[in-house]
Amino acid sequence: VSMLIDKPDWVQHGDGGGAPIFAVDVHPEGNRLATAGGDGTVVLWSVGHMLGQLTKQSGGKGSKAKAKAGTGAKGKENHQGDADADVESQSGALGMTMTKVEDFKDIERVATLFDHKGKPVNVARFSRSGRFIASGGDNHLVLIHELRPGTSAGGGFGSRVKNRENWALQITLSGHSNNVTDLGWSPDDSMVASCSLDNTVRVWDTLRGSLITVLQEHTSFVKGVVWDPVGKYIASQSDDRSVVIRTVEGWETVEVVKAPFVKAVWNTFSTRLDWCPDGSHITAVNTYQSPKNTAAILMRGSWSRTHDYIGHKGPVVTARFNPRLFRVASDDDPTQKYVASCVALGAQDNKVTVWLSRKARPVLVAKTFFQQSVVDLTWSPDGLTLFAASIDGSVAIFAFDEKELGERLSAKEVQGIMDNSYGTARAHTGIAEDPALMQLLSGEDGSGSLAASPAKAAMVGRSNGSGKALAPVKGQKASSAG
């Protein structure tokens, strides 16, 4: 298999490990991985160290990697073997292009943040600039830490932890009356939206540290919130079995989507929906099409459900889009290529799946890595490495070869898609400054033509014409064993 897979046992929360990990997020530079845990801390880990260990494991003579089978983008198994099958290292799988990914390669922990005072931390997200990290938890607070020069003591409970970086508490945002479950930064980092078991979404001004508005449409726990990358909308998903779409200008409700969630399970840990990086659609979670749990695509503008990703046996509780778009061959005609998005799903069946739009089968089904629910996912900025977190207290790493996903579009091409779809006058969206795109400018020349059909049309999931998705074909799924 060209994919490399690992579960670093040193990535853990709590004394001796075992505390749940509720969230995971990669820094825009690609060199730090944040985890939020049930032990009340946010820990920043060295991605360079993780990938270095992964390369050693796979590249050494006689070494073993924890993969049972991998799947190429066409869905055909390219390896069959037992759980100890040798995995050949492909240089492309770890082709992180950020200059700083090698930072901290000789250390495991970059910093530990104790300011939630021992109360479980449910979510942590880096700002798009990478200068800040916001976190929220069971103390009802949202905390924003800022990266400052120098190092710092780990602090908290007499800890002798020495932080390699100084992430200092900058802002404490109080107002929620119950646990904070999810949060997200606006495209230009000027706002953070947080959601809570108090049934609300709160939007905060990150410069002033003040409350902008309280969104009170939901009638039950809100467990997922996401910003439109174009900067026009904000969406939230709740245990009231709805997704609410609002405008950022005026905070007006434009749609309450209920139909896909009629049979949704009520008490999932999270409902972390996500927005495609080109803005064309949302992947909502915790949906159901008998007899399978699914994730549903809601198209921008109509907000209608056009397609489901089918295959999980437990509620899907988190979706995370790859920050990159890919040029891939059509299933129907391999000579024809289209622009595809890539999304990872995590579910309470303890599995992770990865999908390319308009493909009938997943690129990856990781079946046996976790003992408990997968609750959060994140991608490296180069789009080739996926990190998955579970409440069993562990994190798994899936490093893809580019051939498994497709040819990554350049920043110039993505910018062209956005301009064609939404115009060039997108005020205060910060898209042009997105590090995940900007880091490409120095490494890719933008050559190669776009698919004939625009990305907006290409994002529509493959269906059988009735609006129902095509289920993956039995026997064609890849599986990964830990």
Image (tube, grey):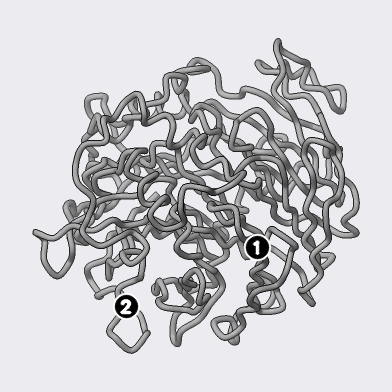
Above or below: residue 306 compared with residue 413: below
State the image coordinates of residue 459 (x, y, percent, origin top left): 36, 64
The residue depicted at 75 percent of the width and 59 percent of the height is 195
> What residue type is disc 1 on?
Ser
Give the amino acid type for the residue marked by disc 2 in the picture: Ala
**Which is nearer the eye, 112 or 209?**
209
Relative image position of residue 469 (x, y in whole percent)? 35, 79
Label 2's element?
loop
Residue 330 x, y percent position in the rendering: 18, 63
Indicate which disc residue 471 carries.
Answer: 2
Say left or right for 206 vs 360.
right
Q: At 50% across and 48% down in the image, what residue appears?
A: 388
Lateral position of residue 384 relative to residue 224, left or right = left
Closer to the camera in the image, 239 or 265: 239
Q: Which residue is mark 1?
A: 270
| Secondary structure beneath label 1 | loop
